[in-house]
Amino acid sequence: MVHPHVERRARIARELADRVPRGTVALFASGHPRPRNYPANTYPFRADSHFLYLTGASIEGAFLAIDGDQSTLYLPEPDDDHALWHGALPEAAELATATGADVAPLGSLEGALAGRNVVTLPSIDPRAARRQSHLVGREVAPGALDARDVPLADAMIAVRLVHDDWARAELAAAAAITAEGHLAAMSATRPGARESLVRAAFEAVVIAHGGAPAYGSIVTVHGEVLHAPPTAREMRSGDLLLVDAGSESPGGWASDVTRTWPVSGTFSPTQRDIYEVVLASQQAAIDVVAPGVRYRDVHFAAARKLSEGLVALGILRGDPDELVADGVSALFFPHGIGHLLGLDVHDMEDLGDRAGYAPGRTRSSRFGLCYLRLDRDLAAGMAVTIEPGFYRVPALLQGALRERAGDRVDDAVLARYTDVRGIRIEDDVVVTETGCDVLTASIPKSVEAVEHAVRRS
């Protein structure tokens, strides 16, 4: 069997060969640990995702050069006291076997690149980006893609958009850890406990499996705040708890799942009504996921179903399609349906909309739709999230968007749902040849299954 990282590098080389002059070298940085408060106190190191995708190795301060069919991993010399404080580094022969690449000292990289045309992708780490600038002889800045590097970005996007068998196995492993963590979080929920206890229950499972949270866990009774920061707020009976939390696999691949459940273990009638609307919206979106389907149409399927449900409840008035087209539904569903998923929880978002949007497509300027992170036609092997929601955001309900909605929102009916701040339901989905596979389907999300899982505490 071909080493997965060897095959990935070969695919990059083939894609790049059609885009750049013969003899061009592609350079990737692993990055460095980033300090917290003072230089020696660093956050846990994780290699830049492009480097990790092509090597599988999380090595500080390293570079990978792809020169046609030859790949070389350039390693820095460790400090004299590195072994004392951090332990011995892997031997070069060991890394060569693990990565399928040649290994050379970092000091030889500058000479190897001399006189060559070099393209690179900016490291998100400023220190590594400065080193890239020196090596390629021009400014390289995090988040700023030079026109000369666009061919490499396009090659990387073409390869990473569709996941190979090894990547899909890693995504499934991350999903399995996440499923176990969400069950633990549900079991830890009870009135009088704190949000931080639930977060700890989830993250304990992740750490026990040798992984790490794929992003900052969102655990909040204020689900109307989309990226609510962590707090130790006390949970009360009658609250809904929104938990948006995912694990990385030990290999660094991400999962991203949201569930919303009643702290008491029982939805109120109004909470249940809205929850069922969101769940139906999510299922409608999942049902249309298939090769060739435009992801924006998946978003519209969810928004349309959500609007139908809110019209049935009397919160909205009018034709569901018109409510979506006019942006009225964005009052309650103000974000996009999801995003790419892979080594990054928002995969390749360091490359901006070049990764998320197909050539010729640009972000809408319309509120709600402007937050759609992905507008490509789906293909077998792509992984995406599906995450509709319903939110009562005071700033939106008192602003210009609410004024434009006019009498299409029934405020008297909406006032009956004051015990619903925010509900989101999110799953990780891999597109198959005939439809899709929901990697996180085992995590409870029907009303009955969610209530049962919380009551087990």
Image (cartoon, grey):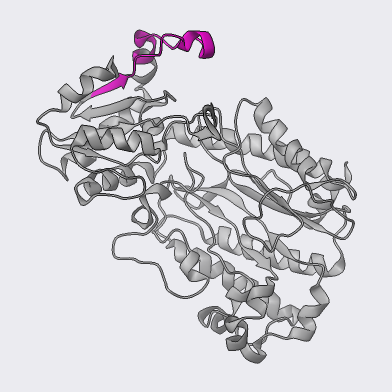
Q: Which of 404 and 44 is in front in this view?
A: 44
Seen at 81% across and 66% down, the residue is 271
Residue 11 seen in the current view? no
- Quarter containing the N terminus: top left
Relative vertical location of residue 388 with respect to residue 350 in this rendering, above or below: below
Relative vertical location of residue 184 with respect to residue 424 in this rendering, above or below: above
Residue 378 is inside the magenta segment: no
In percent of width and height, residue 194 lies at 82, 46
Q: Which residue lies furthest to the bottom in this view?
A: 407
Q: Nearer the viewer, residue 435 or 193?
A: 193
Residue 34 seen in the current view? yes
Seen at 53% across and 37% down, the residue is 171
In percent of width and height, residue 436 lies at 52, 50
Res 376 quadrant in image: bottom left
Judge left or right: residue 194 versus residue 250: right
Res 226 quadrant in image: bottom right
- Quarter containing the C terminus: top right
In percent of width and height, residue 85 lies at 53, 12
User: Which residues lie in the magenta part?
Assistant: 71-96
